[in-house]
Structures are given as C-alpha cells and as structure tokens.
Amino acid sequence: MVFRVLVAMDGSEMGERTLRYALETHPDAEITVLHVVGEPSSMWGKATSLALEDDIEQAAEELAEDVLTTAREIADEYGTEIETDVRIGNPARAIIGRAEEYDTVVIGTHGGSVAERLVVGDVARKVFRHSPVPVTTVR
C-alpha cells in the first residue's frame, strides 16, 4: 500500500494531469506536490531572475505560487489536502533527492511546449532511472 506520494508538478497541463492521476490512484495517501524552480540560467526563463534577488528562497516561492495554487485547487476538487514544497536547482536532482522520503514518485512524461517536452522528458527519464523508490510516469 502506498502511504506517501511525491508528485512533481511543473505548471503545464501535463503537470495538472499528473496530480489528478495521483489523487485518483492513491486517494488515501499523503500527497506532496513538489515544484522545482531551476537554477538560474538562460534555459530556465523566469528562474534567471533568481540570480538578481536578495532572498532567493522567497523569490522561488513567488515563482512557484501559481503552480502551487493550481495544485491546491485541483486537490480541493478531490476533497484532499496536499502538502507543497518548492526547491531551487536541477529538477531531476531535486526530485530524486526528495524521493527516498516517499513510497512512490509520480511525474509527467513531458511539458507543454517543445522546449518543455525536451527538458521535462529528460527530467522524467533521469528520475525514472535514479529514483530510490518506484516511479510512475503519466502521459
């Protein structure tokens, strides 16, 4: 039986579908939604602004707020409370780093745009290969 589920959510429609899958498949589990704000670089769009912030953690929380608000709204539709977490860094490493605290990880296979599909698909592949717990990928 699965008691604790880590759901990686990126703000795409696929991320929302991933959370819905976790809520439907594991209705009695404790679910934590993890959103990773990438390391500042030209590849990470909004995360680039983190490098200029005085309080990086607060800036990451602000960047993640829309995703986490959506996650809470979806959970409310299922009558479930969820935990949320924001990490800064490489998404695959951040997810793998948290995975050992859970019974399973649920992650989408790709994001919305072509660039997101390439990056998120790569993240899902890395998590699938290196997670210390079972991983479910949602398409």
Image: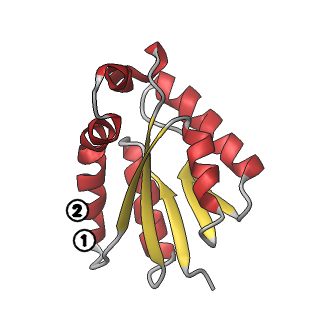
Residue indicated by mark 1: 77
Q: Residue furthest top?
A: 42
Q: Label 2, on which residue?
A: 73
Q: Position of residue 6 (x, y in %)?
A: 52, 63
Are dots 1 and 2 in contact, CB under 8 Å? yes
Where 115 falls versus 129 (above or below)? above
Point 27% across, 79% down: residue: 79
* Amino acid at pointer 2: Glu
- The quadrant in which the N terminus is found is bottom right
Residue 46, x across and y down, in percent: 33, 24
Tell me the residue at 31%/75% (across/down).
81
Label 1 secondary element = helix
Give 104 or 58, whichever is nearer the viewer: 58
Query: Mark 1 belongs to which amino acid?
Result: Glu
Does any portion of residue 139 appear in the rendered image? Answer: no
Vertical arrangement, residue 31 with respect to residue 85, above or below:
below
Q: Is residue 52 visible?
A: yes
**What secondary structure is marked by label 2?**
helix
